[in-house]
Amino acid sequence: MSEMGQLSQLVARGVPFTPKSDQSGVKVKLKVFWKTTRFWTQADIIDYQQNVLVIASRLRNEREYWNKHGEIRQSKFTCEDFAIRVLSEFASSKELPVKLTTGVRTYRNMEMYSSNEHDKYASNKYGFSEIVMLTFGARDMQRGVNTVPINTEEDLKAGDILAQALDRADGIAHHIQMVGRKTPKAIDIFQGNTVDLEGRNRVLDAIRQIKPADPQNWACK
């Protein structure tokens, strides 16, 4: 099957089937935050890792953006919101699919339209980020459908997530950080809920200092 055929099936998964006796069919209406034209490849993943630092640094200093009504919104993020915005910035620019699942529902950049759910959100990366942020919490970063655990610190790459979770008996994440850049001697870490609620990076002196800085970090990508 061609990639375009696979993309058509990707969109069709959310379309309800009609009985064979119904020959009129169903009119499909989608909410398109950005269109999906291809799937992620290994080259896209590497490209994302190479651009995370640039995107995160820009978002840290981007204080405002326009919403669908022409109103100015402040770029303020909780810890997990910042990671969502970085991913949305990259994926939307490359027309790549994003699927994020919470305890409420699954969000996609192209999904079945519902006026009650979608009309208040712009059809762009900002609208997608806002609708996901409505229910997405730090604990959702642990869901196996959203992230994959890594085994060692050496596996850590730019764009990966540090989820603080093991300092609590239930092991549920309550704080999220994103790796902006990794070198043999340092890691740049961004997070959303700093003093001014914008992403701000902290440079660790060495990779091993992840442990004393936050001894119960759980890493995933």
Image: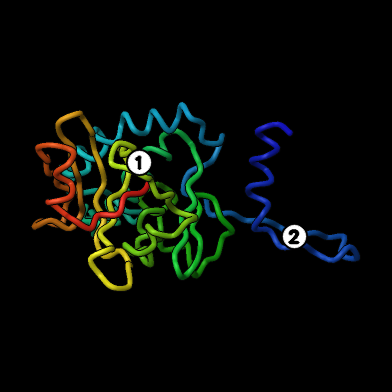
Colour convention of the picture: rainbow
Element assignment for label 1: helix
Q: Residue at x 46, y 55 (%)?
A: 100
Element assignment for label 2: loop
Is the residue under label 1 in contact with that under label 2 (CB below 8 Å)?
Answer: no
Q: Residue at x 52, y 66 (%)?
A: 115
203 w.r.t. 175: above or below? above
Say left or right for 141 vs 107.
left
Say left or right for 92 vs 196.
right
Using the rendered view, name the quadrant where residue 203 is placed. top left
Q: Where residue 157 appears, x then y in whole percent?
A: 31, 36
Q: Residue at x 23, y 54 (%)?
A: 72
59 w.r.t. 19: above or below? above
Of 126 and 100, the residue lying toward us: 100
Of 69 and 13, the residue lying toward us: 13
Say left or right for 47 vs 199.
right
Q: Residue at x 44, y 50 (%)?
A: 123
- Tell me the mark number nearer the camera, choosing from 2 and 1: 1
Q: CA distance from mark 2 to mark 1?
A: 33 Å
How packed mark 1 is, by other alpha carbons closer than 10 Å (few <14, some 14-19, many 20 or more), is some
Q: Where residue 61 appears, x then y in whole percent?
A: 15, 42
Image quarter in which the N terminus is found: top right
209 w.r.t. 52: above or below? below
Q: Which residue is mark 2?
A: 26
Of 35 and 82, the residue lying toward us: 82
Q: Where residue 93 appears, x then y in whole percent?
A: 41, 35
Image quarter in which the C terminus is found: top left
Q: Which residue is mark 1?
A: 89
Instruction: Indicate the amino acid at tag 1.
Output: Glu
Q: Earlier in the sequence, mark 2 or mark 1?
A: 2
Instruction: Indicate the amino acid at tag 2.
Output: Val
